[in-house]
Amino acid sequence: MDQFNLLTAARIFGELGGIILIILALGVAFATWRKNRNPIDLGTLFLFVTVAVAIIYTGVRATLIDLNLLDSSVFLKIGLLDLGDLMTVLMASAYVWFIVYLYQLKIVYSLPLVAGFFFSAYGMLTGDVIPILDYVTWTMLPATLVLFINAIKNKQGLSFSLAILAVAAVLIAVVNPASIFAYAIKWFTGINIILGQNGWWDDHVFFDRKKRKQIQNVWISRMTTSV
Amino acid sequence: MTDIQSILGQVDSYLAIIILPIIVFLLFGRNIKQYRETSSWSWVRTLLALAITTDAAQTLIKLLYRTYDVAFLAGIMTKDANGSSPMDFAYGFIVMFGIILTAYLNRRDEFLLFSVFFQIGAIIIYYTTGYIQFEDYFVYIFGVVALLSLYETGIRVKDNNGLGFAIFYTIQFTVILEIGIIGTILSITAYIFGFFLATGLFRPFGKEDF
């Protein structure tokens, strides 16, 4: 009995930790958007909102089920579509938007918006999630690859953070939701967003060694000449 | 009253059969002529021609089906249990061209294909779920948006075709509301106005524009 309570407490701790971290991350993303006011920060904020809603929804639901306050067959649905699935569609659409924005394909800027709307509508009307899974797979997979390549090629921390987030989203979908891996991924998702928005990846992983060396050399030469 | 209405209805039908193809040929003809002379394509006139072609096609199909009961048109004319048929998408296509024209005249590239994507989505949803309401909302909401912005843009950039398109479809839009004899008179007015528009005689801003 004690062991069961400990396990339940650990699960609740895992879920709540994920929720708190994602709310913190959302705060950081919102502050960044308010500071810069550029479209990419707005797109990022939208993506993080969908991730946050999905994590909060699954977290609260799992916690309520653990506390025997909710039956496991109960889902929060919009039409016939589960809220988590709706957020997944919106997340995939946000990734498509990042790619079209990255390549400046102005003519198809509205495609992710319309595609997301109709895939959600189809899910809400029929409850069929197969087309949604196809859409998510065939949009997030190439988007993740493009973002990884862009991050490495152009040394962009935010691209790396978004690519990691996509991988985390896929992992959350495939691992056992009650396992320690699921909690670890949820915690890491929040931390990853905070690191990406604060520029930690830019400063510590993607810094330009050559440029840094050049700057150091300039300073060293100035110091030695002044001496 | 019924006699007048039936006579006007017949005038409207024959006018549609005669004038709409003439309008389409005139618009495409003038476009080709301009291309030969200047080596540049008028997208405004092309979009106008495409919208009126769609309008002409749906009017003629409806006439053929209702008047002569052409059997092979039953597939697209027969209404389903919800009272909708694939012909309902014709208005959506006209609105689609209107939205593209608005985006083009305002140089808003990000909205250029919005209506195309939406129309494709609405058609896919209709054929997979039978739900046509998205198309209805699209026609009414974006139809009004397209008309208002075409008036605004037509007057602002002094574009004869843009403004003409707006006036033509304002008259057509009232026809959709099916208001009896007045609707028939408006429909006849629209065809006559469309003829003036296609011949290039509608020039409230004076010069001929592209």
Image (cartoon, coloured by chain):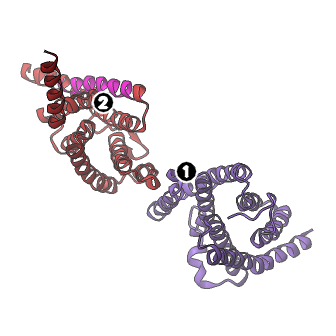
Chain colours: A red, B purple
The image quarter containing residue B25 is bottom right
- The residue beneath circle 2 is A56
- Chain that bears disc 1: B
Q: Identify the chain of the residue marked 2, using the numbered disc in the image.
A: A
Residue A91 on the magenta span: no
Residue type indicated by callout 2 = Ile
Task: Tell me: residue A173, above or below residue B182.
Answer: above
The part of the image, by quadrant, that contains residue A73 is top left
Residue A55 picture location, percent across and down: 28, 33
SS label for mark 2:
helix
**Residue placed under numbered mark 1 in the picture:** B108
- Residue A67 at least partly seen: no
User: For the residue marked with disc 1, what is the amino acid?
Assistant: Arg
Q: For the residue carrying disc 1, how many other residues have a C-alpha within 10 Å: few (<14), some (14-19), or many (20+)?
A: few
The residue under the point 51% across, 54% down is B114
Rendered location of residue A26, percent (x, y): 33, 27
Q: Is residue A101 left or right of residue B200?
A: left
Q: CA distance from mark 2 to mark 1?
A: 37 Å
Using the image as rendered, state which of residue A176 and residue B122 is in the foreground: B122
Image quadrant containing the C terminus of chain B: bottom right
Q: Main secondary structure of the magenta part?
A: helix
Element assignment for label 1 = loop
Q: Is residue B25 in view from this perspective?
A: yes
Magenta range is A14-33
Label of residue A205 in the image: none
Horizontal side of B129 relative to A67 (left or right) equals right
Nearer the camera: disc 2 or disc 1: 1
Q: Residue shown at 30%/53% (left/top)?
A: A139
Position in image of residue A172 (x %, y %): 20, 40
